[in-house]
Image (cartoon, rainbow, N blue to C red):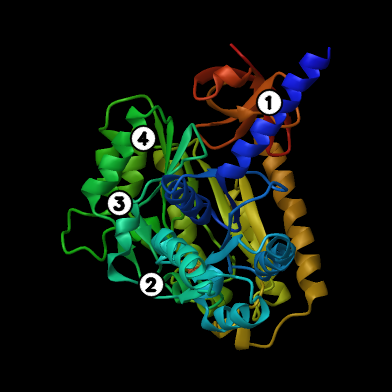
Amino acid sequence: MYNIIYVILCAHRARIKVRKMEKHYRINTYGCQMNVHESEKLAGMLEAMSYTACGEGERADVIVFNTCCIRDTAERRALGNIGVAKAEKKRDPNVIIAVVGCMPQQQSVADSIREKFPYVDIVLGTRNISALPSEIRRVLAAREAAKKRYRCFDLNQPEDYLNIDEGTPQTRTSYPNAWINIIYGCNNFCTYCIVPYVRGRELSRGMDSVLDEVKRCVDGGYKEITLLGQNVNSYGNDIADENVNFANLLHKIDAIEGKFRVRFMTSHPKDLTEAVMDEMAASSKICNNLHLPIQSGSDKVLRDMNRCYDSTRYLSLIEALRKRMPDIGITTDIMVGFPTETEQDFEDTMEIVRKVRYSNAFTFIYSPRKGTPAAAMPQIPYAVKQARIAKLIKEQNRITKELSDQYTGGVYEVLAEDVAPKYEGMVCGRTDSGRLVTFDGGKDDIGEFFNVRINASRSASLFGQKE
Ligand code: SF4
């Protein structure tokens, strides 16, 4: 008995020793899918430096905050968590803390991080995250050699940013889905949005390198490719070759052999072309699903937002899409409480929601972003915004439920994407049209396509059984 306890104790001590020798990292990601994917690149870089991922609460040698500034809440949450990391640094001064991405790309935020969080070692902007390994080495070298502190604040937007895709290892975390960036930045300057200021102007990847990455992912067993960009429809506009455009890219991806699906986001209504809609309709791999942000149903508010389309143009796109793909699942983003939104403008939004009948809508309360034109306009009281969004959500939920009910009894092909978090013995995945389905299955089913009969619906979720 004593021997057994002794052996267990030794094994436990050995495990602790090995863990102490291993180097660990933790990445806290905030915001959109672009950030989720960029964190996969950060993870790839750290793993190439022999760091291993660790979970919340475990000791990490490098802690990275990959931040978002699109809304005030994301910014405040990140700042709160950076504040909490002070305790980790106090416990172990060797921990390296890095803050990267959209938040520090705003000079005022970078300055405030420098002052208020003196324990942060590295600050990198949106287009130089590939400098993380070299900056970690510099922090370590300074400590080693001179017992001095080295702090990096680098917000450059280098020209060779696209090397992030060609030359950087990535640790993909979303199997069977692979995220692939096709374009960075945005030229649109919607008056409420901070993105063009922090992510810079549009920069498209070369078509060959995107196609190579898609092929590598398909060969590696990924079953769903999601093309990412702030505005995927303007892919190629900055490349002096008229064949490099989004419709052609979709066409070439569709021709790649293998059983896989393609989705993309985000599409700007002003740039969605007939050619793209034709490719979607003709393709066997591009999903029957489109996320097309409307933001507001009022032409006056759309003008004030600088969205460069009106409700008539938007509705004509919906009609053109449904003519080509009658079952297409269309989702949207709607912003409530833009500074110039009157009660009538809000009713125009409600009206368009009823007309389009979105499968789902991501609804937001407008939040002023410092440095954008809309932030300088007189603001609407928060209580008014809250009342409007509550009304909008109620209406959208009603429509979503009605559309969900139409799936009941039908059989749909679903890609099993994950084990269902709330239901034992079930997996979840999406139909081609983007509907979330929970059905019988286990871990081994992930990455496989199944025909699933839908037998119940609950708001946006469907429930079914494999045929
Ligand atoms: S299109 Fe408008 S909302 Fe979208 S990222 Fe560009 S500026 Fe922001």
Residue hosting label 4: 217
Give the residue drawn at x 43%, y 54%.
317
Q: Quadrant of residue 385?
A: bottom right
Q: CA distance from mark 2 to mark 3?
A: 26 Å
Left or right placement of residue 169 versus residue 433 in this view? left
Asked which secondary structure carries label 3, the reply is loop
**Of labels 2 and 1, the one closer to you:** 1
Give the residue drawn at x 55%, y 78%.
110
Relative vertical location of residue 127 with respect to residue 275 in this rendering, above or below: below
**Of labels 4 and 3, the one closer to you:** 3
Residue 76's x, y, as percent? 70, 69
Of labels 4 and 1, earlier in sequence is 1
Which label is found at residue 164? none
Of labels 4 and 2, earlier in sequence is 2
For label 4, count other residues whose C-alpha is less than 10 Å away and answer few (under 14), some (14-19) or many (20+).
many
Quadrant position of the N terminus in the picture? top right
Q: Which of the two residues, 371 or 318, is positioned nearer the viewer here?
A: 371
Q: Is residue 284 visible?
A: no
Q: CA distance from mark 4 to mark 2?
A: 29 Å
Q: Is residue 146 visible?
A: yes
Q: Quadrant of residue 236?
A: bottom left
Residue hosting label 2: 187
Residue hosting label 3: 167
Q: CA distance from mark 2 to mark 1?
A: 58 Å
Residue hosting label 1: 11
**Of labels 1 and 3, the one closer to you:** 1
